[in-house]
Amino acid sequence: MAQKKFVVGCFDDEAVLFPAVKQVRTAGYKIKDVYTPFAVHGLDHALGMRETSLHTAGFIYGITGTTTAISAISWIFTKDWPLNIGGKPHFALPAWIPIIFELTVLFAAVGMVLTFCYLCQLAPGVKKHHFHKRATDDLFVMAIECTDKTNTDDLLALLKANGAVETDVQVAEEDWWFGTYDKEEKLAGQVSM
Amino acid sequence: MASIKEQFEIPGRLKTWAYSLIGVGGAVLLYGMFTKGFSSDEHEQVHFWGTLMYNTIFWTLICNAAMFFLSFSAMAQAAWMQSFRRIPEAISTLVPIFGGITLMVLLYIIFGHKHHIYHWLDTEAVANDPILKGKTGFLNPTFFVIWTTLTITLWSVFGYRMRQLSNQADVAPMDATTAKAFNIQSMVRSGFFLVWFGLTVASTIPWLWMMSIDAHWYSTMYSWYTFASTFVAGMALIALWVVYLKNKGYLELTNNEHLHDIAKFMFAFSIFWTYLWFSQYMLIWYANIPEETVYFKHRVQGPYKGIFFLNLIINFLAPLLILMKRSAKRNYTLVALMAVVIIFGHWIDFYQMVMGSLMKEHVELGLLDFGILAFFVGVMIFFVAKALASKPLIAKHHPFLKESIIHHT
């Protein structure tokens, strides 16, 4: 839970955003994130983010679901409570496939939703700083982390030169917090130039 | 676009391969035809004509799947596949050729009165059989011949019209009005193909050509099962040619983004095929009615057991596990390998669908099958290469081409 200084550049066009991301990164600045109104194809690559491990997690959840289903049903129907159902064998694999499939899907789906929320730090009541309100509407908002050595004027000039329509410097909470957006946060967030 | 290699030149090695496959395969085919096909022993006859039949039907249908791919893409106004659309076009030129072979084989079986293949051809047996009698409205030689001829002709005609339209994209740049008219025209022409495809491949044709071998038995899943089998193999064939041409330095505008989407089709339709396989199997297993289980008896518990489960492993487990990862679908080597596995797997599937019904007692998968397969592969390579070389590899004025170039998965 720490306050940090960010330089924020807002863009109104994807075609301008991509070269700008490249310029900022080659200049050596660290982009915290780019907030966009919609999913932008290829932006994760441009930002140099690593591939998400969500699919691997999903695969493991799915396999867990399959294993759970197979072991539970086979134990119940062959050991715990064998029943004669229409003269079928106790180990009636074809009849179980739909349930095995459903449980695989259920485990994978629920597990991935929860993992996704965890990775993105999403939960009821969790709050995060908004760098710009229009990030959910029509602006692509790039937040760049500042260090002690960052020259904010240079950076602002670089952003403007690369087509940012709005720029400012914000001191903001970098992580999430639990509670509300209070007055102090709003004030602290808007130390603009 | 100055540096684009538009003209495909057939490499010498490809020609050598095609000629030697046709040579070896043709020799086996002719040898089989004279020793088995025209022999007086019915078992030998069934062996040869059955083998030729499942090969020719399989290759006709997977080449037709290429035109199906083009047609549904045109109908959905899909753009991503435009950068390699000449490959499915080239594959679909084989429909009249393989379709012609299929037609000849089927007409020979009908007019040669081979009732050991189609039991319903035996008029005396049908007259004394209430079940077959009830099916005569559909299963009779007249309808079979007319419908088969009409089917193959219309696939060829509608496919030809789609390819002709595509040639317009080579001529001159299109303005907005021309491009719009072109797009509507391609949707109309693909519509004809798609409706006819639905009435044939997705319903009547697999019933007539293959399901009627077990004249008493029927399954409502059968046509979709056949369709899924041929469509996934057709996508695999397109993938193979894409990888081959990329290897030879062509198709500069096609990259692993496009390969990813082709491999997604291979992955998704392998699972769709399994879904139909399972739906057909499980319902019959559960109901356990003798007149239905007769189809599976010798396949699951008899001599075809090995092939039956091998089928499931190479057509379901292998694509599921190997093509699941994103990086696998973008890897040329792995996609090419899986394409070969899938085509072989569905060929085996067709083997057990046809030969499993014709020769229930023993599996004779051997020289004859692989020889005839080699013949068809050789013919396929020869004509696809010829068709690819006959026009530019890229439809450079196609209105959707730009969208395909910047395609991002």
Image: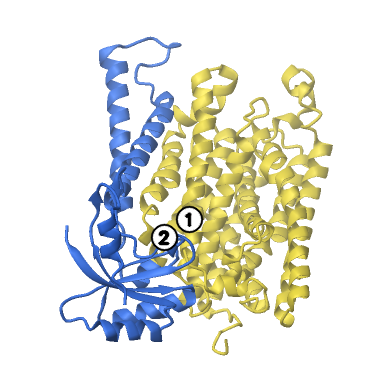
Q: Is residue B336 visible?
A: no
Instruction: Name the colouring of the figure.
Output: by chain
Along the line of sight, which residue is nearer the eye, B183 or A39? A39
Q: What chain is tagged by disc 1?
A: B
Chain A representation colour: blue
The mark found on residue B264 in the picture is 1
Q: Mark 2 packing: few (<14 Cα in 10 Å), some, or many (20+)?
A: many
Whether residue A31 is situated above or below residue B58 in the rendered picture: below
Q: Quick one: quadrant of the N terminus of chain B?
A: bottom right
Tell me the residue that label 2 is attached to. B329
Which residue shows up at 56% across the image and 44% down it? Answer: B350
Report the side of B166 relative to A134 (left or right). right
Measure the C-alpha gap from mark 1 to mark 2.
Answer: 7 Å
- Position of B163 with respect to A44 (left or right) is right
Instruction: Please tell me the colour of chain B.
Output: yellow
What percent of the width, then of the height, locates residue B252? 51, 79
How far from the left and from the top, in percent, is residue B162?
A: 74, 64
- Residue A177 position (above or below residue B300): below
Instruction: Measuring from the top left, give residue B380's x and y in whole percent.
Output: 60, 63
